Amino acid sequence: MRVSMIGAGYVGLVASACFADFGYRVTCIDKDARRIAALNGGELPIYEPGLHDMIAANLREGRLEFTGDTASIAESDVVFLTVGTPSRGGDGDADLSYIFEAVRTIAPLLSDTAVVATKSTVPVGTGDEIARRIREARPAAAIAVVANPEFMREGAAVYDFKHPDRILIGSDDARAQAILAEVYRPFYLDAAPIVHVSRRTAELIKYAANAFLATKIGFINEIADLCECVGADVQDVAHGLGLDHRIGGQFLHPGPGFGGSCLPKDALALIKAGRDHGRQLRIIEAVAAANDARKRAMAEKVVAALDGSVRGKTVAVLGLSFKPNTDDTRESPAIPLIGALQELGAEVRAYDPAGMEQMKLLLPSLIYCGSAYAAAESAAALVIATEWEQFRALDLDRLKSIMARPVVVDLRNIYRVEEMRRAGFRYVAIGREGVA
Ligand code: UGA
């Protein structure tokens, strides 16, 4: 099986490495020559656990190559599209320019029987448009276009790719279905169900899945706010809720609002798709609006914990990436939090195990520190914005001795109220009575 991947971004890199690991010859093509040179030199543009070693091993074994050269496309059974589909800005619609540019590049080069499989998240109907453009360029060929969305999470992408809950193959073409089922054959060992649906259905499932996950998070965050008013503990509420199999316990962890490159952008794109068809998607509209408001409101928790004002005070923020195990800071809740704290007159010191380089581009005026303790030095409050493992068992005595005031605002609920109280901290969390 010969596979080409167009786009050496998150999805392209992980999918390339994993397919190569299963024994396929994979060529990952990107037009960014610097990125390709870096990849061939063993340097990854992203931080993703396990990926570096897997790529190095497959490069060594000759199963994987990174190139700007499109020669492999002619020999490929399947060409995956894994380019970015960012928000176009303004109306929330997905920007499909990279997709159509990739299609323009590959269309003349594809073999007559190739399968083009779109892994990028694309609005419903995009596959039809890709097929139309390919047909126009290659009227005599029998090239199939399949929607094959990806469900990996950043930070756990390699595991998710190799152990999918399901593999979606969106196509009505029996030959294309069979070829893709063959590509995914190595996954059978894990009994991942292959779900065959129409192309449009597959495209919509991807958006619906992310919108549903966003809704679960938005829901528990709202319940967390109510918990704070009525004296209930949201962690226990989430546990009690999640034990109901119809609800399920995952994605019920309250926090400062969801971020990342997918959930916020895909919610907006789904809302836009609804609007385009005269349908108002009220639930997801409310989820998106509540999430934006929540992120902006997190600074108020810090202000309250510091008796009404952060002006002239030093605040330490631990965690800049939108979640642990990634250096990705896109739509990170830390960004509006830090912006608001600075506007209110606080001096912000920050530390993140992987996300500082990215954040420096966005917030150059922050004081970037070498460790959690260095950030906490002389701080009036310590805010935990991302639940990195190394923040979960901080030396509380040491922390207390170096901070100006023993105040911790835990936006990820990683500590126990009792423990923090015993250690002498004023502890503010999410959805738990915690102000000591
Ligand atoms: C998300 C989906 O989970 C993946 O299935 C999907 O493939 C991916 O988008 C995509 O479309 O490419 P990802 O953005 O990597 O994955 O991260 P998530 O683990 O979904 O987390 C998103 C945000 O929600 C983070 O800010 C996280 O902190 C927050 N979150 C997540 C919560 O606040 N509570 C939770 O219980 C779970």
Image (cartoon, grey):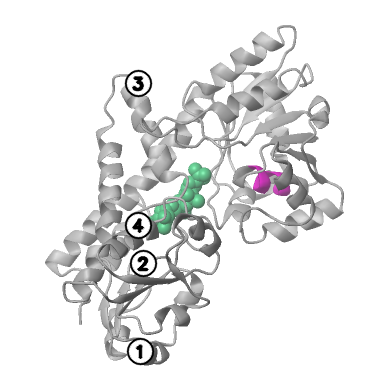
SS class, disc 4? loop
The residue at 22%/75% (across/down) is 305
Horizontally, is 17 left or right of 212 in the view? right
Q: Earlier in the sequence, mark 1 or mark 3?
A: 3
Q: Is residue 64 visible?
A: yes
Dot 3 amino acid type: Asp
Question: How far apart are the alpha carbons under marks 2 and 4?
Answer: 12 Å
- Cα distance between the residues tagged 1 and 2: 20 Å
Question: Which dot, 1 or 3, sits closer to the camera?
Answer: 1
Ligand 1 contact, mark 2 (Cβ < 8 Å): yes
The foreground one among 281 and 91 is: 91
The residue indicated by pointer 1 is 400
Q: Is residue 54 above or below residue 186?
A: below
> Which one is in front in this view, the residue at disc 4 or the one at disc 3?
3
Query: In the rendered image, which residue does mark 3 sit on?
Result: 276
Amino acid carrying mark 1 in the image:
Lys
Direction top: furthest residue? 140
Q: Is residue 210 above or below residue 172?
A: below
Q: Main secondary structure of the magenta part?
A: helix
Foreground mark, 1 or 2?
A: 1
Spatial CA distance of label 4 from label 3 is 31 Å
Write down the quadrant of residue 131 in the picture.
Answer: top right
Residue receiving disc 4: 252
Residues at marks 1 and 4, CA–CA distance in whole angstroms: 31 Å
Q: Residue at x 49, y 23 (%)?
A: 200
Question: What secondary structure is found at the residue carrying circle 3?
Answer: helix
Give me the disc on residue 412.
Answer: 2
Residue 63 in picture, x, y percent from top left: 83, 46
Badge 1 element: helix
Q: Residues within 10 Å of mark 4 (few under 14, many from 20)?
A: many
